[in-house]
Amino acid sequence: QVQLVESGGGLVQAGGSLRLSCAASGRIFSANPMGWYRQAPGKQRELVCTITSGDSTNYADSVKGRFTISRGDAKNTVYLQMNNLKPEDTAVYYCYARITTTFGMARDYWGQGTQVTVSS
C-alpha cells in the first residue's frame, strides 16, 4: 500500500513563511515527479509546483519567486518552502506523486491534504 503523508500546514500572517513536508512510503520503485497542488474553497484544485527526479522544477506563475520545492535526502520526500505568503495562498495543499510500484504499476497518488491559512 502506497501512502503520501503531509505535514507543516497552519495559520500564518501575510508576509510570513511555512514549510510543508511530504513523505511517500510503501512498495515504491520510483516517485517521479512529485509536487504540490492546492484547492481553495469554491475553486478547482490547481497546480502549485512539481519536481522531477532530476530536480527539474515547474511553478505556477502565482507562486514563482515566493515558493521553492525541493527533494529531501530521504528517498521519496519532498518539501515546499513558502515565503511572503498572501491571503490568496489560503487553501488545502495536497502532496502529489506519480508512483511506480515494485510490481510495475504506475499511477498518481495524493496525500490527505494540509490546511494553510494566511491572515491579512
Image (spheres, rainbow, N blue to C red):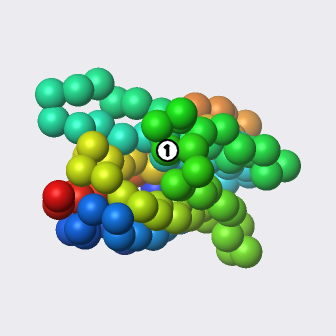
Q: Please state the horizontal and vertical placement of residue 52, each as a whole percent of the image.
A: 74, 45
Is 1 on the left-hand or right-hand side of 18?
right
Residues packed near mark 1 inside 10 Å, few (<14), some (14 to 19) or many (20 plus): some
Is 113 on the left-hand or right-hand side of 18?
left
Is 101 on the left-hand or right-hand side of 67?
right
* Res. 77 in view: yes
* Res. 7 in view: no
Which residue is nearer to you in this view: 35 or 48? Answer: 48
Q: Please state the horizontal and vertical placement of residue 23, each as a whole percent of the image.
A: 53, 64
Q: Residue at x 31, y 52 (%)?
A: 86
Q: Determine the residue located farthest toward the bottom in the rendered image.
A: 73
Q: Residue at x 84, y 49 (%)?
A: 54
Q: Secondary structure at mark 1?
A: loop
Q: Residue at x 68, y 62 (%)?
A: 71
Which residue is nearer to you in this view: 23 or 14? Answer: 14
Q: Which residue is mark 1?
A: 63
**Hey, which quadrant is residue 5 in on the image?**
bottom left
Identify residue type, mark 1: Val
Determine whether 108 is above or below 8 in the image. above
Which residue is nearer to you in this view: 63 or 95? Answer: 63
Q: Please state the horizontal and vertical placement of residue 115, each as a whole percent of the image.
A: 24, 57
Is 81 on the left-hand or right-hand side of 103?
left
Which residue is nearer to you in this view: 10 or 95? Answer: 10
- Marks counted in the figure total 1
The image quadrant where one finds the C terminus is bottom left
Q: Residue at x 35, y 70 (%)?
A: 16
Q: Please state the horizontal and vertical placement of residue 41, each as a whole percent of the image.
A: 16, 36
